[in-house]
Amino acid sequence: QVQLVESGGGLVQAGGSLRLSCAASGRTRSISAMGWYRQAPGKQRELVAVRTNGGTTHYASFVKGRFTISRDNAKNTVNLQMNSLRPEDTAVYYCNADATVNIEGAAVQHWGQGTQVTVSS
């Protein structure tokens, strides 16, 4: 099993910044990628950013250069630096880890408890 703990959420005004952090523990050797998702009220959970063990990075289009994901594979941590925040960024942000479970590459997703980010107008 993999356990994920997020921190760094809070309340900021539009244009402000927050830095989210996530630490993984447990069966961390099985992790192939770590990233961040978010879920706003009444909406589906959506990908924000993800970074693989090999260093490949993918960002959602709505980030538009405002967010930066960083990851330390050895320490099993992943961070999300969020700048120029907008009210529409308000959501619960979840740390995610993909863990490989078989030789074919199938994976299970592990989730943190979520951290609230609220951006005021």
Image (cartoon, rainbow, N blue to C red):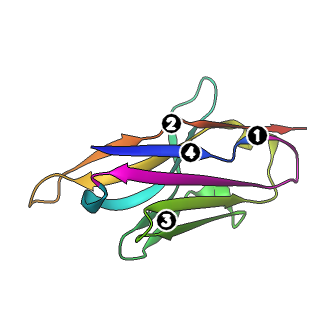
* Residue of label 4: 6
Q: Tell me the residue that label 2 is attached to.
A: 45
Question: Disc 2 vs disc 1: which is toward the camera?
Answer: 1
- Discs 1/3, front: 1
Q: Is residue 22 above or below residue 58?
A: above
Q: Which of the two residues, 113 or 47, is positioned nearer the viewer here?
A: 113
C-alpha span from label 2 to label 4: 16 Å
The image shows residue 57, relative to residue 15, as above or below, that is below
Choose top left, top right, bottom left or bottom right for residue 118. Answer: top right
Residue 50 within the segment the image draws in magenta = no
Q: Residue at x 51, y 32 (%)?
A: 44
Lower position in the chain sequence, tag 3 or tag 2: 2
As helix, strand or loop, the secondary structure at mark 2 comes to: loop
- Quadrant assignment for the C terminus: top right
Write down the residue under mark 3. Answer: 58
Q: Main secondary structure of the magenta part?
A: strand
Badge 4 density bin: few <14, some 14–19, many ≥20, Cα 10 Å = many
Tell me the tag on residue 10.
1
Q: Give the magenta-colored segment's residue range.
A: 11-27
Please tell me which of labels 2 and 4 falls first in the chain: 4
> Which amino acid does the dot numbered 2 rest on?
Arg
